[in-house]
Image (cartoon, helix red, strand yellow):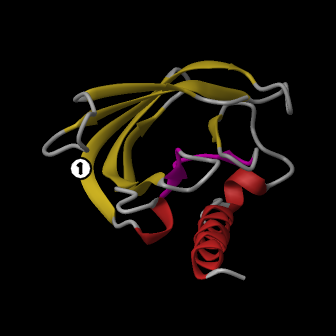
Amino acid sequence: MPRDTLRTAVMLCAAAALAAAVVPASASAGSRSAAHVVAVDCFRNPQVRPGDFLLACGDGNNRLVSLRWSDWGRTSAVGSGLDAVNDCRPYCAAGTFHSYPVTVRLDRPQSWQKRPELQHFTRLQLTYTDDRPSHTERHVTYNLWD
């Protein structure tokens, strides 16, 4: 296997393992309370107050890490952490991750298609509180998957 392909495969496996490892026990329990609103990750797992959250599901080159939540309610959640972004220079498999401090807001809860008894946040907003990746606005909004 070519070295670049192997490196990419290893990075993707590591990102998948990291994402699977951070699902709290309360998020995977079969008898969850409908009172909790969840964040659905790339692997369609419900999470409450995740410590990490993968934003770039396809390649793992952008993820939120070291998340700490000051509020997790029925209509929104607010926290802070770092946005770890791969600069992909000279290409993504050989790139370097850089971390940028952010505040995170989740909101717009809706019924989740996979488990209609759960509400899930459908929008994530990032605000960079210091430096930010080049060509990135200070405020970024993502529509989250269902």
| Rendered image quadrant of residue 6 | bottom right
Q: Residue at x 56, y 56 (%)?
A: 60
Question: Is 142 displayed left or right of 90 in the figure?
Answer: right
Query: Is 133 a magenta residue?
Result: no
Residue 118: where, in percent of width, then height? 76, 30
Residue 124: where, in percent of width, then height? 47, 29
Residue that mark 1 sits on: 101
Does residue 50 appear in the picture of this structure? no
User: Which is nearer the eye, 93 or 26?
Assistant: 93
Q: Residue at x 58, y 71 (%)?
A: 11
Residue 24: where, in percent of width, then height? 64, 60
Relative to residue 92, is residue 94 depicted above or below?
below
Task: State which quarter of the image contains the N terminus.
Answer: bottom right
Outermost residue to the front: 2
Few, some or many residues within 10 Å of mark 1 (<14, 14–19, 20+): many
User: Which is nearer the eye, 105 or 91?
Assistant: 91
Mark 1 element type:
strand
Q: Residue at x 23, y 41 (%)?
A: 134
Q: Which residues are magenta?
A: 45-55
Task: State which quarter of the image contains the C terminus.
Answer: top right
Count of residue discs: 1
Q: Residue at x 52, y 48 (%)?
A: 49
Question: Is 68 displayed left or right of 45 in the figure?
Answer: left
| Rendered image quadrant of residue 41 | top right
Relative to residue 23, is residue 110 depicted above or below?
above
Residue 19: where, in percent of width, then height? 62, 61
Amino acid at circle 1: Pro
Does residue 49 appear in the picture of this structure? yes
Main secondary structure type of the part rendered in magenta: loop
User: Which is nearer the eye, 131 or 37?
Assistant: 131
Outermost residue to the left: 130
